[in-house]
Image (cartoon, grey):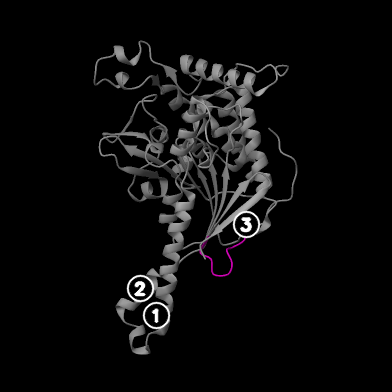
Amino acid sequence: MDISDSAPASVPAQAQRVLVLQGGGALGSYQAGAFQALCHAGFEPEWIAGISIGAINAAIIAGNEPEMRVPRLKEFWEMVSSPVSWNPLVSGERARSVFNETSAAIIATFGVPGFFVPRIPPAPLWPPGSSQSQSYYDTAPLKKTLESLVDFDRINDLKTRLSVGAVNVTSGNFCYFDNYEFRKRGKAIGPEHIMASGALPPGFPSVIIEGEHYWDGGISSNTPLDFVLDEETKRDLLIFQVDLFSARGELPQTLLEAAEREKDIRYSSRTRLNTDKNKKIHNARMAVRELIGKLPDNLKNDPTVELLREASKENTVTVVHLIYKSKNYETNSKDYDFSHVAMVEHWGAGVRDVHLSMRHKEWLERPQSGEAMVTYDLTGDEAKSRGSK
C-alpha cells in the first residue's frame, strides 16, 4: 500500500480544502488509499464530511495528528479485514467472484473483528421492542475501536472540522453532527455520533443520542456534498469527493448483476444534480448583480438593494470527483466483502486514482471565466469536467 514519489501539487491559496466521503462499507478502504495519496500530494483537509463508512474514515482522519492519520487508517482496515486468503495460483474472474461471495458469506455469518458481531441468540428470538430484536449484529466492538483509534478531544478542539450525517428514525429527518456547530451549543462529538452515521438497518441497531434514535445517513443521502455547499457560501472551496458507488454502469445480464446495479444507483451520489442546481443559483445571482449595476444612483443604497447585493455574493467551488470503479468479478456483496485481498485492492485503486487526478494541474486552480462551480470526474486516464458558467 505504498505510493511512489511525486512532486507535491499546488492548490489555490485561499480555497478551503474539503474532503467528502461517501458511505459504502468494505469499499471504504478505497477512500483510505485516496487519502494516503492526497497526503503525499500536500492536500491537508481543513474540513472532512462523511456518511457511514465515510464517517468512520473521517473521524479517524480528523481525530489524529497529521502524521498519524494514515497509520491509524491502516490499523483500522487491517483490523477489520478477514484473514480469508486468495490463492494467487487460481485465475479467472469466475473463480475470483466465487471467492468474493464466499468471503462475504463468512463475514455475514461471523461478523468483522473490531466492527460488529452476530447477535446470539438471533434478533427474532429477543422480545419485541428490545434493542437486540431490531438488528442482526451488535456494533459494540466498533465503539471500542473508535475509542482506541480516534482522539475525540482533538475533534472537539476544532483542529479539523468534522461533519457526519445520520437519519432520525422516528421523524425521518436527515441531520448532521458537526463539531463546529456543536461547540456553539456546548456539545461534543463522541463515538456514538460516528456509529449513528453508520447504523445501517437491519444489520446494525439504531444509536440513541439525547433520547433520539438514529440510523445510517445513507438511507436518505449517501454523499454529504449538499451539506458542504449549503454550509459554506463565502470562502472558495476545493473539494475532493470520494464516492464508492457509480451512478453509471452497464445493463445487467444476471440476477446478481441486477442486484449490484440497483445498489450502485441507490447509493451513488447525485453530483450532476448538485452542479446543475449550482448553475441555476449562479445565473440568478449574476442576474441580480447585473440588475443592481443598472439601477439609478438614488436606489443603489436602498436597504432592499443592499440585502440583494449581499445575497448575490458567491464563492467558487472546485470539485474533484473520484468514484471507485467495480471490477468485473465484484457483485452485490462488494460492500461487505471485508477480505484482506479486497481491502488491499480497493486501497491501491484509491492511490492510483488520486495520482491520475494530480496529473491535471488545472483541476486544482480556481474556476476561471466567470464559473462559480466546476466538477472534474476521473474516468480511467481520461478527465471530464462540468462547469456552472
In the drawing, what numbered circle is on residue 126?
none
Q: Is residue 378 above or below residue 207?
A: below
Establish if 259 lies above or below 303. above
Q: What percent of the width, then of the height, locates residue 18?
A: 52, 50
- Residue depicted at x 63% and y 21%: 94
User: To which residue does mark 3 refer?
Assistant: 364
Question: Are the two marked residues, 2 and 1, in contact with CB atoms closer than 8 angstroms?
Answer: yes
Label 2: state its secondary structure.
helix
The magenta-colored residue range is 365-373
* As drawn, 135 above or below 319: above
Q: Position of 191 compared to 106: left or right?
A: left
Residue 343 or 95: which is nearer the viewer? 95
Q: Which residue is mark 1?
A: 292
Q: Tell me the residue that label 2 is attached to.
A: 308
Q: Quadrant of residue 367?
A: bottom right
Location of the N terminus (image quadrant): top right
